[in-house]
Amino acid sequence: MKNKILVTGGAGYIGSHTCIALHEAGYEIVVYDNLSNSSREAINRVSTIIGQPLAFIEGDIRDAESLRQVFADHAFFGVIHFAGLKAVGESVAKPLLYYNNNVSGTITLLEVMMEHNVKNLIFSSSATVYGDPNTLPIDETAPRSCTNPYGQSKLAVEHILEDLSVTDKSWNLISLRYFNPVGAHPSGQIGEDPNDMPNNLMPYISQVAVGKLEKLSIFGNDYPTVDGTGVRDFIHVTDLAAGHVAALDYLKQLALCNNDAIGFLPINLGTGKGSSVLELVNAFADVTDQTVPYQFTDRRVGDIASCYASADKAKTLFGWQAKLSIIDMCKDTWRWQSMNPNGYRAP
């Protein structure tokens, strides 16, 4: 059976960690990335970690001819689709860019996959599709709604995948809804490397700790939570990468057993418990023995009080569950940040 996987956006934060997990699980990988929000250096470092060159093609998912050439040159079992823009604030400022890249780009990818009869897809979705949840923990049957163009683009792709699975019963379409990925590879060689000001909490904390930023702004301290700050389901990026391998193994097993296609299958990837922003800041300071000065500021529009997953479905179907703790997340983030104070860029 074919064992080759196309990883779109494989030079990015989650994609690069997943490439290592895929290699360790025996999969052959081809990375396709336009490097708009990632680095070629990440590919070089993944190659070093796995001990062999990583096949890399620079290209855009909106470029149908480029994709056709990639599919003509390789016999893929399936695609793991990470390629997408992901900054909420930028999506509000540039909605057309987000819909063009995230939605139109996915349609182009699906059309080329169909042309080459590759119908196994694992899509990088997000817990943002749940909006402000009515109940916690959030399971996959919860209502979906979004408050920004980034989330809307993820939800739009989910609707497209659902519609496709209805009209063509031969597709296997798994949508992995991530909660809050943090941490880095234990080697310290790869991690989250924002191009400009960090949009996510953990890289902001670590850049304050390393001295790149003066202080952390915590948006809101009057939420109905344990300490007034927002509560989120933080998941180690290597646990998240393992979730992709588990989903792929599930599809391989279905193919080996000649089972019918599954259609559209949404799956949460989270730890199943929430931690507050202040708890994460204090844990990072304790673990690393670094000072993380912070200030409270006004809530951000669209932020919600609490959001954490029910991850039971992933455990039942894939045999997957998150294993690493907040302490592990903080240790690995600090190792990456202290070893690479400028990320993948030279000092």
Image: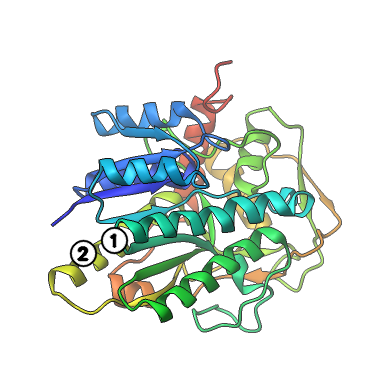
Image location of residue 119, percent across then percent down: 32, 64
User: How many marks on residues?
Assistant: 2
Image location of residue 299, percent across then percent down: 82, 60
**Tag 1's secondary structure?**
loop
Residue 267 lies left or right of residue 172; in this view the side is right
Residue at image point 67% right, 72% down: 131
Query: In which quadrant of the rendered image does the C terminus lie?
Result: top right
Q: Is residue 308 above or below residue 16?
A: below
Cα distance, mark 1 to mark 2?
Answer: 16 Å
**Tag 2's secondary structure?**
helix
Residue at image point 49% right, 46% down: 61
Q: What amino acid type should be assigned to the residue bearing mark 2?
A: Lys
Q: Is residue 185 visible?
A: no
Query: In which quadrant of the rendered image does the N terminus lie?
Result: bottom left
Residue 117 lies left or right of residue 278; in this view the side is left
**Residue placed under numbered mark 2 in the picture:** 252
Query: Depth-wise, is mark 1 or mark 2 nearer the camera?
Result: 1
Quadrant of the rendered image containing residue 130: bottom right
Badge 1 or badge 2: first in the primary sequence = 1
Image location of residue 304, percent across then percent down: 72, 68
| Labels 1 and 2 touching (C-beta < 8 A) | no
Q: Which disc number belongs to residue 117?
A: 1
Q: Nearer the viewer, residue 173 or 163?
A: 163
Q: Which disc number belongs to residue 225?
A: none
How many other residues sit within 10 Å of disc 2, few (<14), some (14-19) or many (≥20)?
Answer: some
Q: Nearer the viewer, residue 188 or 328?
A: 188
Q: Nearer the viewer, residue 4 or 125?
A: 4
Image location of residue 81, percent across then percent down: 43, 54
How many other residues sit within 10 Å of disc 1, few (<14), some (14-19) or many (≥20)?
Answer: some
Q: Is residue 218 visible?
A: yes
